[in-house]
Image (tube, helix red, strand yellow):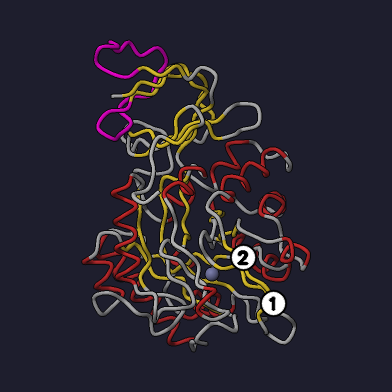
Amino acid sequence: MLLLKNVDLYTPAPAGRTDILIAGGRIERVAPDLGVSESYCEVFDASALVAVPGFVDSHVHLAGGGGEGSYRTRTPELLLSDAIRGGVTTVVGCLGTDGVTRSPENLLAKARGLEEEGISTFIYSGYYAVPVRTITGSIERDLLLIDKVIGVGEVALSDHRSTQPTFDEFVRVAAEARRGGMLSGKAGVVNVHMGDGPRGLSLLERSVKETEIPASQFLPTHINRNPALFEEGTAWAKAGGFVDFTTSTVQASLDEGEVPCAVGLRRMLEAGVDVSQITFSSDGQGSLPRFDERGRLSGLGVGRVTSLFAAARDAAQCEGLPLEVALQVITLNPARILKLHRKGQVAAGSDADVVLLDPGELDIRGVIAKGEWLMKDGEPAAKGTFE
Ligand code: ZN
């Protein structure tokens, strides 16, 4: 057992000074002045710190991604230490453009490895392409038979790297995800990679208009990648859809009009979008390719999970949003949308995933995942197997 004493808690809603008792990997109690004998548990004086829920990153290329500039541009796997540094205690893994040399089986194994190393992991079935490549033969079967599979994606639309699915093909993917999600009690969400193409969200909008599949089945990502898509995403969110911003970026993208996440969050809220419709994800370990006007690869970076909290912190520190609002898009919202019921909050019964921040600069000083210290007093307390 671990007792965090007298911490300033954001659940993510502000909850004031309290103690947090952790037992068996779960939050046992949250209340001021818990009288627990020190002989029974580790007591940690957290009175100089802020406690927030461990961050939920809904879009990470756990096993690597990329490859759009030939084999040497395939990106490396996520290391446990990257997740720890970023305060990310729950990740959802996905494949990317390459579903031939990258397989869902490999992604599943990587997710299980990270789970053994200390964080919580889930995956999406499939990759950019339609028809999707699955483990058991169908999206529905993957959702029903593999615990870690919680949805499908990232399916690429409006992008030159997409397999250009027709409307019927795309809707079939969403239908399978919905059916598998219902039958397994999971989200069955369709994580949709949005490219820069002018068709934007049109296939999602048609799906909602022409079928019975609700907007909540979709989580379109990279919605801040250009001004036009951002405006379309704002309208989609105002109409009840979810939107996901990508926090990893390179300066060249920002120069070309990508909307910085912190600015975008403020602007969407000002436009009247309910904050519960918005999530951030890092696109960690994804490639950040740059293409010139003729579609030729001109540069390449790698996404980082550490960008997730950095962007939320910017929203609080630079855009003047309340800390609880900035936190919500990387904790409660992704957990709720992905139906990860024990994630995204610090409350009795939740998994004991807690990040400790210094109250001034909001630097990450501690990370607890499933009740175990991964970072303590600003120093790593755990490492990946080969680190
Ligand atoms: Zn993507």
What number is the disc on residue 4?
none
318 vs 168, nearest the viewer = 318
151 vs 249, nearest the viewer = 249
The residue pinned by badge 2 equals: 301
Q: Hey, what amino acid is under mark 1?
A: Ser
In the image, residue 375 above or below residue 298: above
Q: Hey, what amino acid is under mark 2?
A: Gly
For the residue with label 1, is its CB less than 8 Å from the closest atom of ligand 1? Answer: no
Residue 315 appears left or right of 117: right
Q: Determine the secondary structure under disc 2.
A: strand
Which portion, as a residue range, is magenta? 22-42
- Where in the figure is residue 171, as x and y percent of width and height? 43, 81
- Where in the figure is residue 365, as x and y percent of width and height? 52, 31
Marks 1 and 2 sit apart, C-alpha to C-alpha, by 11 Å
Residue reaching furthest front? 386
Residue shown at the point (49%, 67%) measured from the top left: 215
Quarter holding ligand 1: bottom right
166 vs 53, nearest the viewer = 53
The residue pinned by badge 1 equals: 298
The 10 Å Cα crowd at callout 2, few under 14, some 14 to 19, many 20 or more, is: some
